[in-house]
Amino acid sequence: MFVRYPPFGKEKTDYAYAVGRIRALETRLLDRQRVERLLEAKDAEEVLRSLQDTDYGAYIPQLESPLAFEDMLEAERARAFELFEELALEEELVYWVRSFYDFHNVKVLIKSLIAEKDFRYALSPHGNIPPEDIKAIFQEERYDKLPAHLQTAVEKGISSYYEKRDPQRISLAVDQSAYLYLTGRSVRDAFLRNYFRLQADLLNLMTVVRLKFIGREDLIRFSLLPGGFLEIERYTQEPLDTLSGRLYHTPYYAIFDEGINSLRAKGSFSRLYKLMDDYLVGYLKETRTVALGPEPLIAYLYGKMNEIKILRMIFVGKIYHMSKEEIKERLPLPY
Amino acid sequence: MESGLIIAIAGAGLAAFLAGIGSAVGIGLAGRSAAGVLAEDPDKFGRLFLLVALPGTQGFYGFIAALFVILKVGLLGTPIAISVAQGWQIFFASLPVAFAGLLSGIHQGKVCAAGVEMGAKRPEATMKAVIYGAMVETYAVLGLLITLFLLIGIKV
């Protein structure tokens, strides 16, 4: 097991231009001080005003009200994807990053199908298959048009729902297919693959904690994702009190030690979620020492996603008049 | 043409072209990084210029060494008759700058590319990055000096 983060790829000199551009763009990401200032804002309108001189400034004039902040965030996310596609020299890199959203769309569409409701608004435009196409496939029930890995996800998603008639099972089954696919050896970029593997570990440990906390340990063995670094089965029998101690030799110890303590004290998972996000942001930050390679590019994209998540939390918090501390408690560190 | 002279010319050629390759690759790397930064922030051209130009020196060192050989064997006028042994001496004397130039040029390019990326974030620290780049330069200079001393020492 690695000490803090797994090692990643070799130097790729072809990325000199891309990394130069990314380093210049990184100066425009929101830093801690800026996030702190946004938290100080008295309402969503003021948050929006404080974003005037950032990457988001260009979208603000088109917004009808601060409540439409989601449009602004989506536009920025689309820009980040466009940039990623432009700078990534290997098409497969774009493919793997986009694949995650294919699985997301499969999840949304199976749920739509089963609930007989239109969840189209929840479809992501960032998958490899355009939302209209994948929607048409589901409408026509022509799943054979999907690539094999998504066909399997659909089959598993639908059949797992009918086992217990539980919609949560859909997400779980599709996520299991997703992590199996995204952590496989076919993902040749070690940085990206390890990012998914770290996510799998963290989500699994979170599942163990969550289910033990609510006393549904019987569900643990159906709820785990494949592809992580940990042999997760070794931790599923451990009582919640000693779980973090059992993780002592892993890089996740600090997260779960502090997170579980906070869970016990406050009965809330917020701290644990935040620590998990911070750990992943820390992994992205490891790319700061990479001068030539695709890693800074991937890190910028996910860093941007993280920033968008931060902004969404701040906007939602301000709209619902939450206090600064309440919002901050769950807010991940910026990249 | 005598074989001695051919071997000496091969040495001069090697010094010029290997060190030249080093510089070309090095500038290629630093230049691409700088182009990336300038695409987003064109005002940084002046600050980054030195970092892009720095890996170019190896090519000049190779050129100087090659010129020194050319002058030594009188290729610009009437070539001096040199033996095969002297030809090999000149050939091997040319190698330090050739290889030091090739490898230091490439690595200096990498250091400078990283420096350019640092300059994108912390423009005020660009000169520090130049110093790191210049540290790699030392070994190209040492290679050139040894080549020149050896060439001076060879009696023709």
Image (tube, coloured by chain):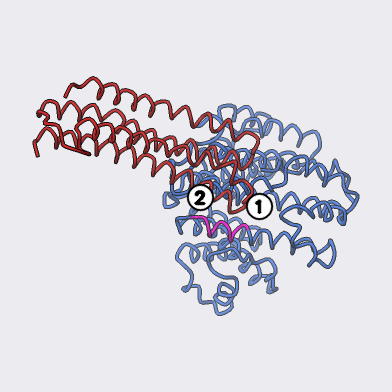
Left or right of B14 in this view: A59: right
Chain A painted colour: blue
Q: How far apart, in angstroms, are the residues tagged by discs 1 and 2?
A: 22 Å
| Residue A66 image-quadrant placement | bottom right
Chain B painted colour: red
Comparing A313 with A233, the one in front is: A313
Numbered disc 2: secondary structure: helix
Q: Judge depth for marks 1 and 2 and give the one in front.
A: 2
Pointer 1 residue: A305
Q: Chain of mark 1?
A: A
Left or right of B63 in this view: A227: right
Numbered disc 1: secondary structure: helix
Residue located at (77% from left, 34% from top): A264
Is mark 1 in CB contact (under 8 Å) with mark 2? no
Screen quadrant of the C terminus of chain B: top left
Comparing B5 with A250, the one in front is: B5
Q: Position of residue B141 (x, y in %)?
A: 39, 27
Pointer 2 residue: A17
Q: Main secondary structure of the magenta part?
A: helix
Q: Position of residue A85 (x, y in %)?
A: 53, 59
Q: Residue furthest bottom?
A: A140
Type of amino acid under label 1: Met
Comparing A135 with A231, the one in front is: A135
Number of numbered tags placed on the structure image:
2
Segment colored magenta: A80-88
Type of amino acid under label 2: Tyr
| Residue A209 image-quadrant placement | top right
Of callouts 1 and 2, which one flags the residue occurring earlier in the amino acid sequence? 2
- In magenta segment, residue A86: yes
Q: Position of residue B61 (x, y in %)?
A: 36, 33
